[in-house]
Amino acid sequence: GALVVAPNGNTRAVLAGSPAADAGLALGDVILSVDGELVTHDTSLAELLSTYDVGDTARLSVYRGGETVVLPVVLEDQSVVIY
């Protein structure tokens, strides 16, 4: 999975107004899969999301607080995303 973290104490883990924030993704969440495709060492989150077009909805399975939730994320232009 992909752990949602803040790179340092002065940075947010999820940018306000971003697709991730709009979907409810939060610090400490672990993204397990994208539309059923597992996020692994061999298949990164960025790689999975690169197969979508702007405006598509990706359903993220997220482990949070001992349970798994599904968050739909409407994707934006990835050229402005920093991984």
Image: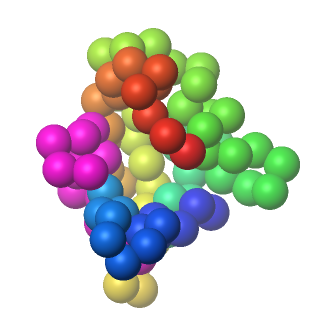
Residue 21 vertical placement versus 1 (above, below): above
Q: How is the image coloured?
A: rainbow
For residue 29, say whether it is visible.
no
**Relative side of 67 to 42, left or right:** left
State yes or no: residue 18 in magenta. Answer: yes
**Relative side of 17 to 65, left or right:** left
**Relative side of 32 to 28, left or right:** right
State yes or no: residue 26 in magenta. Answer: yes
Query: Which image quadrant is residue 29 in?
Result: bottom left
Query: In percent of the image, x 26 and y 51: which residue is there?
Result: 15
Query: In percent of the image, x 36 and y 84: which residue is there?
Result: 65
Query: Which image quadrant is residue 59 in?
Result: top left
Residue 16 appears at what percent x and percent y?
Answer: 18, 50
Residue 23 vertical placement versus 47 (above, below): below
Query: In percent of the image, x 31 and y 16: which residue is there?
Result: 55
Q: Considering depth in this image, is 58 or 14 the residue closer to the camera?
A: 14
Q: Considering depth in this image, is 19 or 82 the residue closer to the camera?
A: 82
Residue 8 vertical placement versus 23 (above, below): below
